[in-house]
């Protein structure tokens, strides 16, 4: 994606790539996904998701692995109830956040 998407549901053997300059509103990932653009919300239930771009509203990790070296500028909630969340970029949360190791 180099354009603009609303809801994205990626599962099974799917591969979702949000390129630099691309935007997506709500992304649900249970396969393989990457973001170099801007995503409003991410729900990762399985699979692997890599972020080098910006996540702006909420993120929930209940399974799989999310690796982020991008910008996490949450206006909402960061929830990690399962899976693995690795953050090595810039992370701020204006809402409720669950502690994680950076």
Image (cartoon, rainbow, N blue to C red):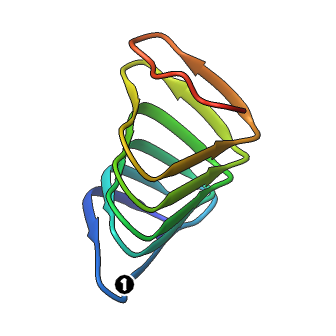
Question: With respect to residue 72, does 39 lie above or below?
Answer: below
Q: Nearer the viewer, residue 46 or 40?
A: 46
Q: Residue at x 28, y 63 (%)?
A: 8
Where residue 16 appears, as percent x and y from the top left, is 44, 74
Give the percent coordinates (x, y) of residue 102.
72, 33
User: Mark 1 sits on what residue?
Assistant: 14
Quarter of the image for residue 87 reads top right
Locate residue 77, reporting x and y percent. 37, 23
Q: Give the left or right position of residue 70, taking residue 44 as reference.
A: right
In the picture shown, does residue 35 fall above or below 95? Answer: below
Determine whether 43 is above or below 9 in the image: above
Q: Is residue 92 left or right of residue 60?
A: right
Task: Give 97 or 58, whichever is nearer the viewer.
Answer: 97
Residue drawn at 69 percent across, 43 percent down: 70
Left or right, 78 with respect to 6, comes to right
Q: Quadrant of residue 75?
A: top left
């Amino acid at each position: 994606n180099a354009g603009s998407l609303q809801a994205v549901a990626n599962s099974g053997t799917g591969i979702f790539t949000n390129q630099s300059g691309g935007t997506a509103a709500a992304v649900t990932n249970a396969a393989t996904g990457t973001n170099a653009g801007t995503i409003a919300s991410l729900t990762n239930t399985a699979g692997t998701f890599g972020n080098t771009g910006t996540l702006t509203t909420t993120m929930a990790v209940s399974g799989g692995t999310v690796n982020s070296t991008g910008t996490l500028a949450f206006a909402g909630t960061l929830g990690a109830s399962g899976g693995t969340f690795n953050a090595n970029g810039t992370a701020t949360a204006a809402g409720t956040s669950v502690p994680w190791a950076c």
